[in-house]
Amino acid sequence: MRGTRAWWTARKAAARRDAGMSTTEYAMGTIAAAAFAAVLYKVLTSGTVTKALESVIGKALDAPF
């Protein structure tokens, strides 16, 4: 039990020292999110996807009730 308690105490102390991300980590996360958004935008505005979305919406609007 002492070994387990010592391990948990060490883990808690380590967690307190590393409270959050550094500025570099925020910058890399922001760049990665922006790059993902750019790729997603290009995919969604491509001709194939646009035609598919228009087809789905057109079928939904023309559905008989």
Image: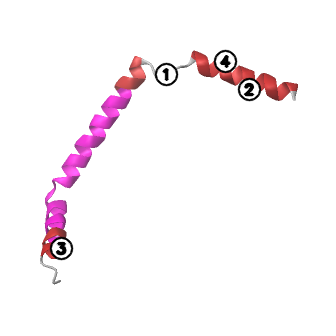
- Please tell me which residue is depicted at 19% across the width and 70% down the height of the picture: 56
Inspect the magenta stretch and tell me whether residue 22 lies in it. Answer: no
Lower position in the chain sequence, tag 4 or tag 3: 4
- Residue 63 placement, left or right of 10: left
Q: Secondary structure at mark 3?
A: helix
**Residue lying at the far bottom of the rendered structure:** 64
**Residue lying at the far top of the rendered structure:** 17
Q: Secondary structure at mark 4?
A: helix
Q: CA distance from mark 1 to mark 4?
A: 14 Å
Expressed as whole percent of the image width and height from the top left, the position of residue 57 reads 16, 68
Q: CA distance from mark 2 to mark 4?
A: 9 Å
Lower position in the chain sequence, tag 1 or tag 3: 1
Residue at the spot of label 4 = 13
Lower position in the chain sequence, tag 1 or tag 2: 2
Residue at the spot of label 2 = 8
Q: CA distance from mark 1 to mark 2?
A: 20 Å
Residue at the spot of label 1 = 20
Residue at the spot of label 3 = 60
Lower position in the chain sequence, tag 1 or tag 4: 4
What span is in magenta?
A: 28-55
- State the quadrant of the N terminus: top right
Q: CA distance from mark 4 to mark 3?
A: 57 Å
Expressed as whole percent of the image width and height from the top left, the position of residue 34 reads 27, 35
Q: In this rendering, is residue 32 above or below 24?
A: below
- Please tell me which residue is depicted at 16% across the width and 80% down the height of the picture: 63
